[in-house]
Amino acid sequence: MSQVINVYLSSRGTDKKHDAFRSALDILKELLLKYQRTHSITIAGDFNASFHRQYKETQDELFKNFCKDNQIVLPSNYSIDHTYHQGDSKSQIDYILTKPRENDNESTEYMHVKILSEGHNTSDHYPVSADFSVRLQTTQTQHSGDIVTKINWEKVDKANYEQNLKDELKHKKNI
């Protein structure tokens, strides 16, 4: 199974924003703990942190350590081009990241990620898209033919039921 998580992490700046960023990483960690054993996980969105920023930024270090500690990876073919621009400032802060399901050597996923920088985009962020190829393993479950029903006593004619039960018991010799 696969789980997709969309994120928008707080931008950098004040201590309050750094606290909000840490809090968002804590929530993301809870989601990873919930799904990592049963799902491959894709996390996409505006992380407001970068793997490739030229100058050191606190959130970048928190982000990189979080990804490393939780085995979250950047697809190998991910472009190093920028996804955000404001005036002369450019950086890559929008990502589509993956975390394979725990102890799963069978599922192989391939992701081709594109930064869509062409066209008429009015945002200061470029869209990022991904094409997935997933090999799925099917399993067939056989269900028994026995159907178990529960008597709804609200709808039963109890006097008739009692009489039928007495008649059945009269014919049983070993009871």
Image (tube, rainbow, N blue to C red):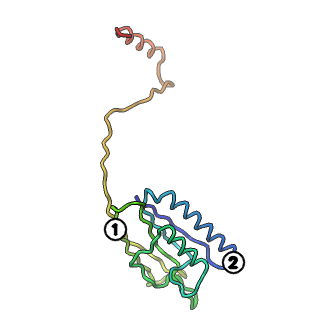
Q: Which residue is mark 2?
A: 14
Quadrant containing the N terminus is bottom left
Q: Is residue 147 rendered to the left or right of residue 89?
A: left
Q: Residue 175, relative to residue 28: is it above or below?
A: above
In front here: 120 or 145?
Answer: 145
In front here: 98 or 93?
Answer: 98
Q: Which label was assigned to residue 66?
A: none
Q: Which residue is mark 1?
A: 133
Query: Number of callouts in the render?
Result: 2
Quadrant containing the C terminus is top left
Identify the residue shown where x is 42% and y is 10%: 166
Q: Amino acid at mark 1?
A: Ser
Q: Distance between the Cα atoms at labels 1 and 2?
A: 41 Å
Identify the residue shown where x is 47% and y is 27%: 152
Identify the residue shown where x is 51% and y is 25%: 154
Q: Secondary structure at mark 2?
A: loop
Q: Is residue 140 rendered to the left or right of residue 94?
A: left
Q: Residue 118, relative to residue 167: is it above or below?
A: below
Residue 146 screen position, x and y as percent: 34, 32
